[in-house]
């Protein structure tokens, strides 16, 4: 596991590719590029048979540079670090900060690869990868890049906490069709790791992700909903819709019973108390409350207090007062 720090001071846990997987990817790439080089060379020899030896040598050198040097550089630039061999091995080249590579990174990697891979038959690259703590070859060191594994076991994914029950059904009318998969992945990763982030950094990330999500859905983030709570609620709404589509046929077969409106796995949100415990948010008083009632604690991890008033504030009152309304699911601070 490698911990990289982004410009927002967020630690990213990436899985650096080790020598066996990298060697397999390089071998597959070399097979493709050498085959292309041989085909180009045969075509040039047939087309330039009437030229002198010097011209044929110059064309052979040009073909070598274009195919075996320019080819990998162009492929990594256009695919942002995913060549054919890396796709097959589940690898990708990224910058040291975890971002996608650009032309200058691919250029440095490609030029140094001529020496450490082609001219030395990969001996220099293997030694450098074995010595490096993150398995980097010389091209990665000089280019400021890192080859990481893209395929992460699904079983290792973190738990996404459910939203508080007072937001149940509030975002049922959002249009989520325009939200890309990359944004959903970023939101899910934030929700699974928000307890590990610095409060200020985590709050800034939540605000940015909430703004991006609101821009895609076309509806602004409600003023009375903190950004992390908004993210959790929208993710839960998306999961509920997917579950409803998945179990629609079973619901119809059962005669449209009560389970049709609440697919399995979506009705347990209100019964998860204490997921968001109390926490202090930068710039907010520790006595801020979720609503106007003094006995209702604020949601932890989520920072900003929700203004009082409205149906959500009244519905958030605990049933300990005998009001008969469902509780919030939040545990008061000790």
Image (cartoon, rainbow, N blue to C red):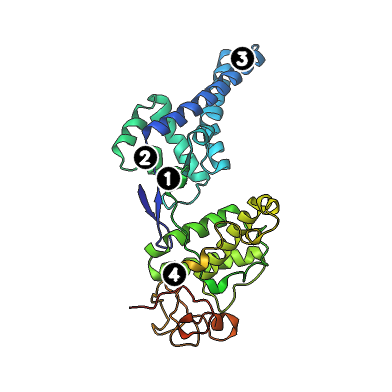
Q: Is residue 227 above or below residue 73?
A: below
Asked if marks 2 and 1 touch (Cβ < 8 Å), the reply is yes
C-alpha gap between disc 1 and disc 4: 43 Å
Q: Which residue is mark 4?
A: 273
Tag 3–tag 1 contact (CB < 8 Å):
no
Which is more N-terminal, label 4 or label 1?
1
**Residue identified by numbered label 2:** 136
Label 3 residue SS:
helix
Pick whichever of labels 3 and 1 is earlier in the sequence: 3
In the displayed structure image, the side of residue 49 where residue 158 appears, left or right? left
Q: Residue at x 54, y 57 (%)?
A: 265
**Which percent across, then down, holds residue 232?**
52, 65
Q: Residue at x 62, y 69 (%)?
A: 169
Q: Residues within 10 Å of mark 4 (few under 14, many from 20)?
A: some
Name the residue located 60 percent from the left edge and 21 percent from the top edge: 40
Residue 215 lies, in percent from the top left, at 63, 66
Looking at the image, residue 78 sits to the left or right of residue 256; the answer is left
Q: Whole-Å distance between the Cαs marked 3 and 1?
A: 38 Å
Between residue 156 and residue 24, name the one nearer to us: 156
Q: CA distance from mark 2 to mark 3?
A: 38 Å
Q: Which mark is residue 172?
A: none
Q: Nearer the viewer, mark 2 or mark 3?
A: 2
**Residue 318 in sight in this render:** no
Do residues under tags 2 and 3 come within 8 Å of each other at their CB atoms?
no
Nearer to us of marks 1 and 4 is: 4
The residue that disc 3 covers is 45
Neighbourhood count class around disc 3 (C-alpha, 10 Å): few under 14, some 14–19, many 20 upward: some
């Amino acid at each position: 596991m490698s911990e990289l720090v982004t410009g927002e001071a967020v630690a990213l846990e990436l899985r650096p590719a080790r020598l066996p997987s990298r060697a397999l990817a390089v071998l597959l790439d070399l097979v493709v590029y050498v085959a292309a080089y041989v085909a180009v060379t045969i075509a040039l020899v047939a087309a330039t048979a009437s030229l002198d030896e010097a011209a044929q040598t110059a064309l052979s050198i040009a073909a070598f540079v274009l195919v075996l040097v320019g080819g990998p550089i162009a492929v990594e630039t256009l695919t942002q670090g995913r060549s054919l061999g890396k796709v097959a091995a589940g690898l990708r080249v990224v910058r040291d900060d975890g971002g996608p590579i650009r032309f200058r990174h691919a250029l440095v990697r490609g030029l140094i690869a001529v020496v450490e891979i082609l001219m030395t038959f990969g001996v220099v690259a293997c030694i450098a990868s074995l010595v490096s703590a993150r398995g980097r070859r010389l091209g990665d060191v000089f280019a400021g890049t890192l080859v990481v594994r893209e395929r992460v076991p699904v079983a290792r994914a973190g738990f996404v906490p459910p939203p508080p029950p007072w937001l149940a059904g509030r975002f049922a009318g959002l249009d989520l069709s325009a939200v890309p998969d990359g944004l959903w992945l970023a939101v899910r990763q934030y929700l699974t790791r928000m307890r590990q982030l610095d409060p200020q950094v985590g709050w800034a990330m939540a605000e940015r992700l909430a703004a991006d999500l609101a821009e895609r859905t076309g509806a602004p983030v409600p003023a009375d909903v903190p950004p992390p709570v908004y993210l959790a609620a929208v993710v839960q709404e998306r999961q509920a819709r997917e579950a409803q589509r998945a179990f629609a046929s079973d619901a119809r077969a059962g005669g449209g019973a009560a389970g049709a409106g609440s697919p399995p796995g979506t009705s347990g949100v209100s019964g998860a108390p204490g997921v968001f415990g109390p926490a202090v948010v930068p710039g907010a008083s520790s006595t801020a409350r979720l609503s106007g009632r003094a006995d209702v604690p604020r949601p932890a991890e989520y920072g900003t207090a929700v203004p009082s008033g409205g149906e959500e504030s009244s519905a958030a009152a605990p049933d300990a007062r005998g009001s008969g309304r469902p509780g919030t699911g939040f545990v008061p601070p000790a």
